């Protein structure tokens, strides 16, 4: 239910709620779903390419391709 609610928030305001992708990525990591987490990091970086943790996200994406 939480994932559904977070995705709805993103649909309502995709740019303003970009940070929710980071929350979803963490949820997926905790659920041991790294490919889903990777997808969320990619989507986040498309919206916020200058994020200070960009290198960390790119490293995670490379280690967990879709």
Image (tube, rainbow, N blue to C red):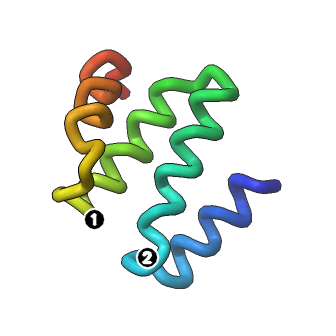
Q: Position of residue 43 (x, y in %)?
A: 34, 53
6 horizontally vs 20: left or right: right
**Which residue: 25% across, 55% down?**
51
Q: Position of residue 60 (x, y in %)?
A: 34, 25
Eyeballing the image, is 5 above or below 34?
below
Determine the CA span between mark 2 and mark 1. 9 Å
Report which residue position mark 2 lands on.
Answer: 14
Give yes or no for contact between labels 2 and 1 (Cβ–Cβ under 8 Å): yes
Q: Residues within 10 Å of mark 2 (few under 14, many from 20)?
A: some
Q: Residue furthest front?
A: 52
At numbered mark 1, what does the secondary structure look like: helix, strand or loop? helix
Report which residue position mark 1 lands on.
Answer: 47
At numbered mark 2, what does the secondary structure look like: helix, strand or loop? loop
Q: Earlier in the sequence, mark 2 or mark 1?
A: 2
53 horizontally vs 39: left or right: left
In the picture, the quarter occupied by the N terminus is bottom right
**Which residue: 37% across, 20% down?**
64
| Of residues 56 and 21, the one drawn nearer to the viewer in this rendering | 56
How many labels, in total?
Answer: 2
């Amino acid at each position: 239910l939480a994932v559904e609610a977070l995705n709805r928030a993103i649909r309502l305001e995709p740019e303003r709620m970009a940070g929710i992708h980071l929350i979803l990525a963490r949820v997926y990591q905790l659920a041991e779903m790294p490919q889903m987490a990777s997808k969320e990091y990619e989507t986040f970086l498309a919206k916020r390419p200058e994020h200070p943790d960009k290198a960390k996200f790119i490293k995670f994406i490379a280690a967990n391709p879709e």
